[in-house]
Image: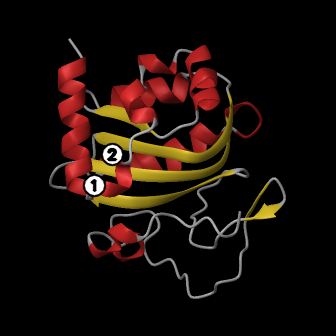
Amino acid sequence: MHHIEPFYSWRKYYISEHDEKNPFYGMDYSSLSPRNTVYNYYIHPYWDEFGSQTLYLKVLSADYVNQFLILEFIGEWNDCLYNDIMFLKRNVIDPFIREGIKYFILIGENVLNFHYSDDSYYQEWKEDIEDGWIVTIGFRKHVVEEMLKIHLDHHIYFLEKFLELDWRIFTPQTLFNYVQQQLHRTLP
């Protein structure tokens, strides 16, 4: 797992550690020594920790003008034992919402499992962004099935066409435009 890096080809558009509005501003990735683990396997040191014991992320893009954020995840999303959504909401999402972000793209190809608790933080997140949206891309089918068991689709969009979307062919702006266009076509 230590060979799985966050997507780096968008660094010409956005660098997380250089963004003063980003909770990970000023992070130093000069040490290439892995320090975090998932299932006792070290993960690449470029993944950021936000309080979870099993889930890590990378802010791939934050566009304050167009109000969107793209996050990539790795690990086990465990709300049941570790309340990962609380840490994500309080330590990452809330600071970006305060900066005007209201559109969220969550990339979950490397999310291995999801263990649910309740949906209160997801509901709060959706309420906080009013007319914004939260979309998942690339989450594994069994992870989506677990998320749907507690009706997270009341708060997050899980469109079939996004499960296998080759999002790497887009720029951050064109991915956001594509997702927004697809949502407008799909939703009533």
Q: Residue at x 60, y 21 (%)?
A: 145
| Along the line of sight, the residue nearer the viewer: 117 or 138 | 138
What secondary structure is marked by label 2? Answer: helix
Horizontal side, residue 134 vs residue 67: left or right = right
Q: Residue at x 64, y 84 (%)?
A: 32
Location of residue 80 (image quadrant): top right
Residue at the extreme top: 188
- Give the position of the N terminus as an image quadrant: bottom right
What secondary structure is marked by label 1? Answer: loop
Location of residue 56 (image quadrant): bottom right
Q: Looking at the picture, which amino acid does disc 2 mark?
A: Ile
Give above or below for 174 relative to 26. Answer: above
| Along the line of sight, the residue nearer the viewer: 43 or 120 | 43
Circle 2 packing at 10 Å, graded few (<14), some (14-19), many (20+), is some
Q: Looking at the picture, which amino acid does disc 1 mark?
A: Phe
Q: Which residue is mark 1?
A: 170
Cβ atoms at labels 1 and 2 below 8 Å apart = no
Horizontal side, residue 75 vs residue 180: left or right = right
Horizontal side, residue 182 vs residue 134: left or right = left
Query: Is residue 159 among what the camera can see?
Result: no
**Where residue 126 sits: x, y (%)?**
38, 28
Q: Which residue is mark 2?
A: 97
Query: Is residue 160 among what the camera can see?
Result: yes
Per the model, the C-alpha gap separating discs 1 and 2 is: 24 Å
Q: Residue at x 20, y 11 (%)?
A: 188
Q: Residue at x 27, y 40 (%)?
A: 102
Horizontal side, residue 143 vs residue 152: left or right = right
